[in-house]
Image (spheres, grey):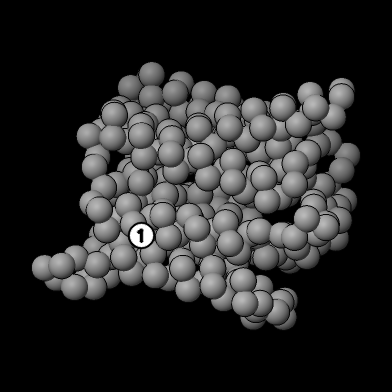
Amino acid sequence: MADDDRHRLAVASLLYAATLWGMVWYPLRWLDAAGLNGLWQSVISYGAALLVVLPFYRGRAGELRRRWPRLTLMALAIGWCNIAFVLAMLEGDVLRVLLFFYLSPLWTILLGRLFLGERLTVRVLVGLAAGLAGMVAMLWRPELGFDGPRARADWLALSAGFGFALANVLVRYLRDVSIVGKTLVSWLGVLVIGLAALLLSGPAWPEATPAAWWGALALGVIGFVSMSFAVQYGVTHMPVQQSSVILLFELVAGGVSAWWLADESPRVTEWLGGLSIVAAGLIVQWRSPDAECH
C-alpha cells in the first residue's frame, strides 16, 4: 500500500473510532432502557469481544506470563476506566462526561512525574494550568460559586480519566508486549471489575428483552473490537500530534449527537471550560517535529 493510501486509511480509521466513541452513549442508554444496566452491558460486550479475538492469540501467552504484575495493574486500571466511563455516560450529560474524561492527559503528566521521573517543561506546565482552569470554569456557577463535581457521573468520569492515565503510564513499561496481548488483558480487566461490582451489588439476573442481549453482544463484537483496532491502526501509521487532534473529534461527535438526540445543551461556562481542556490536551500531547513517534 502506498504511503498516501496508508495515511488516508489511518485518518479514516481514527475518524471512525472517534465518531463511534463519541456516540456510544446512545446504544448504552438504549440497552439500559431495555433492561441491561451498565455493569451487565460491560460484562457481556467486553466478554464477547474477548472471546472473538482470543483464538487469534493462541501460542503467544508467554509474553504475558513474563510481565504479569504490571499487566495485572494495567488491566485493573483500564477495567475501572471502562466501567466508570459506561456508568458515567448512563447517568450524566454526554459532553460533560467526555470533557471530564479528557482531563486524562493532565493526570498522565502528574503520574509520569511521580513514577517515571519525567521533567515538567514550561509547555507541559502551561497545558496543566489550562486544563485545571478549564475544570474550574466547568464547575463554576455564578449563583453558587465553585460547587465541585455535582453528581456521581462527574466523579465517575474524573476517575475514568485517571484510570486511563494510569494505564498509559504502565503501558510505557510494557513495550515488549504485543498490542493484541495488551488489548486482551485490558478487556479481561473490564470483566474482572464488572463481575466484582455485580457481586457486590447483588447479581440479580436482569429482566432484559432478547433484543438487549443481542444488542450487547453486537456492541462488543462489532463496536468495541472494530473501534479498538481502528485506533491502533491509526496511531501506528500517523504521527502522534496528528492522531491526537483527530481523536478529539470524539468531543464533536458526542456534543452534536447529545444535542440532537437527547436535547442536551451545555452552559456557556461548560463550553468555555471544554475549550480550555481541549487546548490543554493538545498542548501536553504535542511533540516537536523530530520527536520519535510510536
In the rendered image, which quarter is residue 121 located in?
bottom right
The answer to whether 121 appears left or right of 179 in the picture is: left
**Pointer 1: what residue?**
273
In the rendered image, which quarter is residue 276 located in?
bottom left
The answer to whether 89 appears left or right of 265 in the picture is: right
Q: Is residue 160 visible?
A: no
Q: Nearer the viewer, residue 14 or 269?
A: 269
Residue drawn at 11 percent across, 68 percent down: 143
Percent coordinates x, y for residue 294 in the rendering: 79, 51
Q: Nearer the viewer, residue 16 or 181?
A: 16
In the rendered image, which quarter is residue 26 located in?
top left
The answer to whether 149 appears left or right of 103 in the picture is: left
Residue drawn at 71 percent across, 37 percent down: 234
Tell me the amino acid under the disc marked 1: Gly
Percent coordinates x, y for residue 273 in the rendering: 36, 59
> Up-down: is 277 above or below 186?
below
Q: Which residue is the extreme one toward the left?
A: 143
**What kind of element bears circle 1?**
helix
Residue drawn at 67 percent across, 45 percent down: 242
Q: Nearer the viewer, residue 286 or 193?
A: 286
Q: Which residue is the extreme one toward the top?
A: 211
**Label 1 crowd bin: few (<14), some (14–19), many (20+), radius 10 Å:** many
> Up-down: is 84 above or below 39?
below
Q: How many numbered discs, if any? A: 1
Percent coordinates x, y for residue 191 in the rendering: 55, 46
Percent coordinates x, y for residue 264 in the rendering: 24, 40
Residue drawn at 39 percent across, 70 percent down: 133
Q: Is residue 112 visible?
A: yes
Q: Nearer the viewer, residue 277 or 188?
A: 277
Tell me the quarter of the image containing the N terminus: top right
Q: Which residue is the extreme one toward the front?
A: 289
